[in-house]
């Protein structure tokens, strides 16, 4: 994407009512006004809150919002030029139950209060296969412990990925701590995955399917 297009999207994001872009310093100072107040301040309802972390273009956040009008969805990503697409689609379709938050995921517990979130989706994250990069995996214990802070006690985490390595790595962690609710190593071959797991497909997932790459899904608690 050219720099002009990025700048145009950044400017347009500033006009979108469904895009929230706190300063990093505000989060670090624990002065983010939405924290603990998402339902009252933004959504104006008391429905469950579901996050999509590393949401990219926001296909999953939007797709889930379309199918679940009784829940609130928030796509989280630091790259605003990417989720611009999802934010724009949500406005065009008048989806008032989806928003986008521009923030780093390592600061997620400064964006939401303890117990404020009901579910988390992690869709096609970078598996960070190299050993030195393991701390950047979105299912590394350091991240999972941050998620645990903001999830309610019965909160669920979903991992959908094309990386059999990341699927296996996360299963290994869950054998030591946490609870596996459902696991599928090939959702389009082995039936039984929840409908919204197979119905909603991201741009990259479509590419993986064209080369017959298995898509895995894991539902768990930590």
Image (cartoon, rainbow, N blue to C red):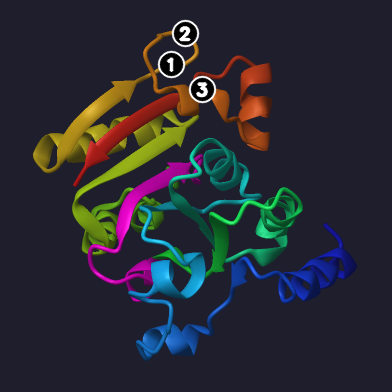
Q: Earlier in the sequence, mark 3 or mark 2?
A: 2
State the extent of the magenta-drawn residues as a range: 106-126
Front residue of 128 and 14: 14
Which circle, 3 or 2, is nearer the viewer?
3
The residue at the point 46 percent across, 22 percent down is 195
At label 1, counting other C-alpha atoms closer than 10 Å, the crowd grade (few under 14, some 14-19, many 20 or more) is some
Instruction: Say whether disc 3 or disc 1 marks the residue closer to the N-terminus.
Output: 1
Is residue 113 highlighted in magenta?
yes
Q: Within the image, what quadrant is residue 111 found in?
A: bottom left
Q: Residue furthest front?
A: 45
Quadrant of the drawing holding the N terminus:
bottom right
Q: Residues within 10 Å of mark 2 (few under 14, many from 20)?
A: few
For the residues carrying marks 3 and 1, which lies nearer the camera in this image?
Answer: 3
Q: Position of residue 34 (x, y in %)?
A: 43, 77
Q: Are marks 3 and 2 in contact (CB under 8 Å)?
A: no
Q: Residue at x 57, y 30 (%)?
A: 200
Dot 2 corresponds to which residue?
189
**Callout 1 touching callout 2 (CB < 8 Å):** yes
Vertical arrangement, residue 220 with respect to residue 222, above or below = above
Which residue corresponds to mark 3?
Answer: 198
- Residue 99 in percent (x, y) is at 56, 60
Instruction: Give me the C-alpha separation between circle 3 and circle 1.
Output: 11 Å
The x and y percentages for residue 110 are: 35, 76
Residue 186 numbered mark, or none:
1
Q: Is residue 100 magenta?
A: no
170 on left or right of 99? left
Q: Is residue 215 left or right of residue 220?
A: right
């Amino acid at each position: 994407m050219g720099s002009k297009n990025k700048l145009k999207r950044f400017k347009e994001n500033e006009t979108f009512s469904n895009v929230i872009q706190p300063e990093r310093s505000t989060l670090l100072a624990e002065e983010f006004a939405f924290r603990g107040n998402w339902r009252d301040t933004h959504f104006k309802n008391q429905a469950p809150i579901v996050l999509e972390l590393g949401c990219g273009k926001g296909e999953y956040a939007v797709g889930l919002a379309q199918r679940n009008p009784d829940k609130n969805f928030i796509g989280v990503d630091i790259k605003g030029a990417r989720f611009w697409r999802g934010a724009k689609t949500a406005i065009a379709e008048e989806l008032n139950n989806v928003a986008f938050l521009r923030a780093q995921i390592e600061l997620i517990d400064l964006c939401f209060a303890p117990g404020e979130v009901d579910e988390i989706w992690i869709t096609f994250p970078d598996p960070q296969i190299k050993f030195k990069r393991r701390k950047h995996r979105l299912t590394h214990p350091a991240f999972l412990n941050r998620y645990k802070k903001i999830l309610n006690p019965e909160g669920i985490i979903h991992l959908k990925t094309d990386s059999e390595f990341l699927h296996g790595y996360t299963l290994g962690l869950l054998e030591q701590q946490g609870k596996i609710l459902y696991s599928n190593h090939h959702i389009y071959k082995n039936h039984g995955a929840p409908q919204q797991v197979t119905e909603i497909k991201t741009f990259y997932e479509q590419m993986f399917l064209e080369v017959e790459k298995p898509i895995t899904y894991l539902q768990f608690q930590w």
